[in-house]
Image (cartoon, rainbow, N blue to C red):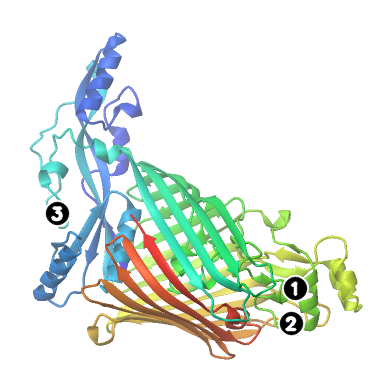
Amino acid sequence: MKRNRFSGLCPWGGLFLLAPTLGAADQCLPLEQAEQQAEAYQSEGRDVIVASHTCPQMSYAVLIGGLAGEEEQHEAIARLGEEGIEAAPAAGTSVWVGEFRHEDDAEDRLLNMLGYGFRSIEIVYKEEELRLYQVVAADDAPPEPDVDRERHSADEPESFTFGDDDDETQPETDDRTDDSDVAWDLDDLRLTSGYLPSGDQPVETYLDGTMSASLRWQPAGPWELRAGARFDAQSQSARPDDDDDVATTWGAADYTENWVRYRANWGRLTAGTQTVSWGAMDFLPPGDRLSAQDLTRGPLEFIDDSRRASPSLRLQTYGSISLDLVLTPVFRAAELPRRETLWHPVDQRRGRLLGVPDDPRVRTLVQQGTFDHEPRSAERDSVGGMRLIESRRSYDVGVTVQSARRSAPYYALSDRAREAALEGDLEGAVQADGDTFIARHPRALIIGGDYTLDAVGATWRLEGVWSSDEPATREDDLRFVTRSGLDWAAGVEFFPGDGDLRTSLQLTGQHLLDAGDVLDPTETYQLGGELEQPWARERWHTRLRFNVGLDRTDVYINPELAWTISDAHEVTVAGHYFRGTDDTLGGYFEDHRIVTLGWRLSL
């Protein structure tokens, strides 16, 4: 899955070398709008005219390559046509499957094609010139260009066009106003209901919902703006014969991506709230340290949906070697569910902390103590990082350096509570001034790299990072400390027998270096993956997600049956099974086994 780009005649910077105009807002206008603007100036006594004007335009196309021959190419076009997806043949046996004004839309189509079982999918960047109009002073009118001039140079790579040429590519058209209008998108609408069969869990039913929408405006020229918001809600009910008061309902609004972006032929600069996801792995990439995690749905959430936006300044360059620079002025910690709900990492009813062994001292402190879940003011400072990626035809290699904070909270005993606990006074520990446990987000220097290779019919991935400061708790005095750490992952994605069964596997290792005697696991090895089989003309999908601990018992299994009503609608029936030792995710959620029914709409 690679991304390429090629340029047309005019770089973005050429926009500012044209004849003088009355203002930037008077450039790159549809004819009707330019004439209205000229009349307004003329009514003020200003001598202006309307002149034709060439404007650069970026578009993004999605290309499926790697098809076996013309017969497979025609079959792919026909199959996608049955699904209402417009496709067209490209050079060789490749297939174009969409051209878009917005890169986000192209990325959505790329992910959609992965769901249909295609491989070797690229996003191709293209710049072209459009004939629009500008309002200029009469004395400064530029010479009228030859309207019959070819729009693309003779040596430009093969072009791609979808839809009616008369509407999209004619140079003298007045119908391009839609391309500069504000576009509204319903990014995601999702509802999930669940039933928990385990009698050890006082929660019997579970509901959650998410809705996110956005407005985007891309006027003719290099600028683009986006505004987005989301609303999340959860509800759970208790078993009729259980005395625990676990029923609760909550809802919360949040921002998504809200930014202003400048695009040029060398790259793009974005300022505003953004979602940053680095790393090469499909599941839990070790180098993904700058993203704000979304933990509100716990293990139910797929990795692509488990990030929140953070206020950031981001510079990205294009080319065979690309640069990605991110600065987040204010650190944003992970988004947590409400304390009373199923997926919170603190369970005060049982006296358990996620990832911590079930110790009698800890159990009492958790059950009776208080928690400060918000980051301390000293931990809200800036974070950032740099990532360099070299992209070739068959491989990508990346290196990263980050100064980041742990997104998920690590709960450490406060000093007063710890001192009382060491004296055996657990009651005094929970009654000490201040909260018993404090959420910590230690800063760490992250250095790492990743490698992706397409070879022998599969995509191979390798990634690893070294971290200067990983949180831990000493066993002897319960003191919060940090230790250096090493995280690595190796994965492969392939289609056995060149069939439709997509298979993705990942081996992961996590190590605390020179840890000493700590309560935390010092080495963890896991095997995770996903299998997906489409059938019945892609209308149905069977999926299986899993994660298995190799050094200790830790099991998560998620079978799913999905009915794709259309490109936008999907209904799913799924199960989530957990089992493991008490210091693992599977052990912590062992009585949270749940059967879910879900519906999702993405436009």
- Between the residue at mark 1 and the residue at mark 3, the CA separation in whole angstroms equals 61 Å
Point 65% across, 67% down: residue: 246
Q: Mark 3 points at which residue?
A: 155
Position of residue 151 in the picture relative to residue 235 (left or right): left
- Between the residue at mark 2 and the residue at mark 1, the CA separation in whole angstroms equals 9 Å
Query: Residue 385: x and y, percent?
Result: 54, 60
Question: Which numbered mark, 3 or 2, is in the foreground of this view?
Answer: 2
Question: Quadrant where the N terminus lies?
Answer: bottom left
Judged from this view, the residue extending furthest toward the front is 241
Mark 1 Cα shell of 10 Å, populated few (<14), some (14-19), many (≥20): some
Query: Residue 218: x and y, percent?
Result: 34, 41
Position of residue 143 in the picture relative to residue 273 (left or right): left
Q: What amino acid is labelled 3 in the image?
A: Asp
Query: Does any portion of residue 224 appear in the rendered image?
Result: yes
Residue contact at pointers 2 and 1, CB within 8 angstroms:
yes
Point 15% across, 47% down: residue: 152
Please tell me in which quadrant of the rendered image residue 345 appears.
bottom right
Q: Mark 2 points at which residue?
A: 518
Query: Residue 358: x and y, percent?
Result: 72, 83
Of the numbered discs 1 and 3, the one sitting upstream in the chain is 3
Per the image, label 3 sits on a secondary structure element best described as loop
Mark 3 Cα shell of 10 Å, populated few (<14), some (14-19), many (≥20): few
Query: Is 563 placed above or below 87 here?
Result: below
Position of residue 234 in the picture relative to residue 123 (left or right): right
Q: Give the label on residue 366, or none.
A: none
- Between the residue at mark 3 and the residue at mark 2, the CA separation in whole angstroms equals 64 Å
Question: Quadrant where the C terminus lies?
Answer: bottom left
Question: Which numbered mark, 1 or 3, is in the foreground of this view?
Answer: 1
Q: What amino acid is labelled 2 in the image?
A: Val
Q: How many numbered circles does the render carry?
A: 3
Q: Which of 218 and 581 is in front in this view?
A: 581
